[in-house]
Image (cartoon, rainbow, N blue to C red):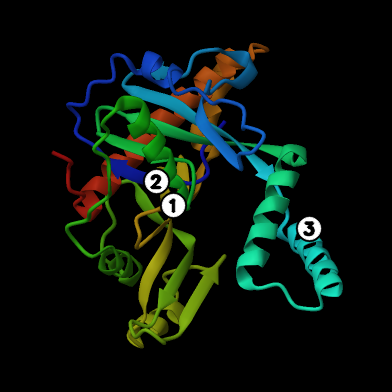
């Protein structure tokens, strides 16, 4: 269990989560209804290996929003709709109007929903109480906001907002590639995205290349700016951060994962606990570096 992407939101560190277990349990996932397209609610992070709706390690919580989505392909609905419309046209000698088409389509969906397959989904989140930040394991802002909304529904109030940088992230990322000193512990990776600042300008995506080379310098001299940049923190974590401040391709490296060797066990719960503790610790260090580098505002 390691997160792959981090979409971050800040909340006041004064937030009280002493009753979190009860609040999440009251908003537990319910099976999707026969005539519903989807259902959302909280599930135990350990799945079948635990029944608690949160896992607590130091000042970090692991919570999970589960879901059930009905699979109802649009092509199937449209095919049946066209057949029904063709039958009506043949019987009545006229093409059905827009209202008739909508009514028939709604009737078809209602008819098909109880027989549709159900796909389970889950979204994990890490809540760091000390930093006042929630990290959702997704690169989609919309999906992350959906998870935050579920937390808000459970708590009654959850004043979490997207990260706000007091300096332009694009300027910081560009400066690092251009040779500005990086924060302690950070080093350049081998991937970046460069864009011409004009709306219709060129976009250059670079992978598996030395970012301090001459080719990159020419792009910078031409006015291109970095909008995504791969970085490594202390040989423990590699990641790609964008100007949207979403962390993608988050990966714990051997320098960090080696710490798990001393916790090898056949106990799945113990392994999950160890993995979360490791990830939570590395995330805390990473966020501290990003907070200082981008001058991230605190939530008050």
Residue 179 in view in this figure: yes
Residue shown at 41%/70% (left/top)? 212
Q: Nearer the viewer, residue 276 or 260?
A: 276
SS at badge 1: helix
Quarter location, residue 196: bottom left
Residue carrying label 3: 76
Task: Judge left or right: residue 48 versus residue 191.
Answer: right
Q: Position of residue 180 (x, y in %)?
A: 26, 65
Given contact means CB atoms under 8 Å apart, are the residues at marks 2 and 1 in contact? yes
Residue carrying label 2: 145
Q: Position of residue 24 (x, y in %)?
A: 42, 21
Determine the CA span between mark 2 and mark 1.
5 Å
Residue carrying label 1: 142
Task: Judge left or right: residue 179 versus residue 143.
Answer: left
Looking at the rendering, in which quadrant would you find the C terminus?
A: top left
Determine the CA span between mark 3 and mark 1.
27 Å
Residue shown at 53%/23% (left/top)? 45
Q: Earlier in the sequence, mark 3 or mark 1?
A: 3
Q: Residues within 10 Å of mark 3 (few under 14, many from 20)?
A: few
Q: Residue furthest left?
A: 300
Quarter location, residue 97: bottom right
Residue 235 in view in this figure: no
């Amino acid at each position: 269990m390691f997160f792959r992407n981090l979409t971050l939101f800040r909340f006041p560190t004064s937030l009280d989560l002493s009753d979190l277990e009860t609040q999440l349990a009251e908003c537990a996932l319910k099976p999707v209804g026969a005539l519903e397209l989807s259902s959302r609610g909280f599930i135990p992070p350990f799945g079948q290996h635990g029944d608690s709706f949160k896992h607590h390690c130091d000042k970090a919580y692991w919570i999970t929003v589960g879901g059930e989505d009905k699979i109802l392909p649009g092509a199937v609905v449209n095919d049946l709709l066209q057949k029904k419309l063709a039958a009506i046209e043949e019987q009545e000698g006229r093409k059905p109007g827009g209202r008739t088409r909508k009514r028939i389509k709604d009737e078809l969906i209602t008819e098909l929903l109880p027989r549709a397959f159900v796909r389970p989904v889950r979204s994990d989140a890490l809540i760091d109480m000390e930093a006042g930040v929630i990290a959702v394991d997704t690169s989609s802002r919309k999906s992350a906001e959906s998870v935050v909304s579920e937390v808000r529904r459970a708590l009654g109030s959850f004043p979490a907002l997207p990260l706000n940088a007091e300096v332009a992230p694009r300027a910081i990322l560009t400066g690092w590639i251009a040779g500005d000193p990086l924060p302690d512990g950070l080093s350049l990776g081998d991937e970046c995205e460069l864009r011409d600042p004009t709306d219709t300008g060129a976009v250059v995506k670079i992978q598996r290349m030395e970012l301090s080379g001459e080719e990159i310098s020419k792009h910078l001299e031409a006015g291109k700016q970095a909008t995504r940049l791969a970085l490594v923190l202390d040989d423990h974590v590699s990641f790609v951060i964008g100007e949207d401040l979403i962390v993608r391709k988050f990966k714990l490296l051997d320098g960090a994962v080696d710490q798990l060797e001393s916790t090898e066990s056949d106990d799945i719960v113990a392994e999950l606990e160890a993995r979360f503790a490791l990830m939570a610790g590395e995330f805390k260090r990473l966020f501290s570096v990003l907070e200082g580098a981008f001058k991230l505002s605190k939530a008050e």
